Image (cartoon, rainbow, N blue to C red):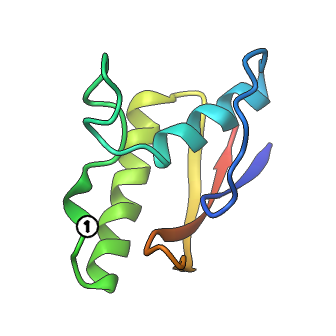
Amino acid sequence: MLIEINTSESTDIDWGASGVSEVAQNVYTLINTLKYEVAYDRTLGLQPNFIDMPLTESVALVTAQIYAIVDEREPRATVESVEFIGVSEDGNLMLRVVIDV
């Protein structure tokens, strides 16, 4: 089942999520978290080294990191594609990630 995750859309945590919803929520959390942000799991999330890089380099680096972190941290999902949408007003990269669950 293909699921599209848009990083520009914020979602509330569903504490009772299970199945496909749980996997999608886990992937959303992984790609919207930077390493060192989570107190008891400092290795969770994307490496923040893409910040202040030229746009083309940062998009390429984040795309590669998304494939790697989903493969490592959420084995029930497979990243099918990562598409750069744009940059938000506050400077965050907006991406559309399609996963197969």
Which residue shows up at 66% across the image and 30% down it?
23
Vertical position of residue 36 compared to residue 51: above or below: above
Which residue is more in the foreground, 90 or 51? 90
- Left or right, 52 with reference to 68: left
Tell me the crowding category of disc 1: few under 14, some 14 to 19, or many 20 or more residues within 10 angstroms, Cα based: few
Residue 21 in the image: state x and y as whole percent: 77, 31
Q: How many marks?
A: 1
Which residue is under mark 1?
51
Q: Is residue 76 above or below residue 55?
A: above
Which of the 4 image quarters holds residue 15? top right
Residue 3: x %, y % from top left: 75, 49
The answer to whether residue 52 is left or right of residue 33 is left
User: Which residue sits at x=25%, y=35%?
Assistant: 36
Q: Tell me where residue 86 appears, x and y as whole percent.
A: 54, 81
Of the pair 2 and 58, the residue shown nearer to us? 58
Q: Residue at x 42, y 52 (%)?
A: 66
- x, y percent for residue 76: 60, 28
Q: Nearer the viewer, residue 27 or 33?
A: 33
Corner quadrant of residue 39:
top left
* Residue 79 position (above or below residue 63): above
Question: Which type of secondary structure does the marked residue at label 1 adopt?
Answer: loop
Q: Which image quadrant: the C terminus?
A: top right
| Residue at the spot 58% in from the left edge and 63% down from the top edge | 81
Quadrant where the N terminus is found in the figure = top right
* Amino acid type indicated by mark 1: Ile
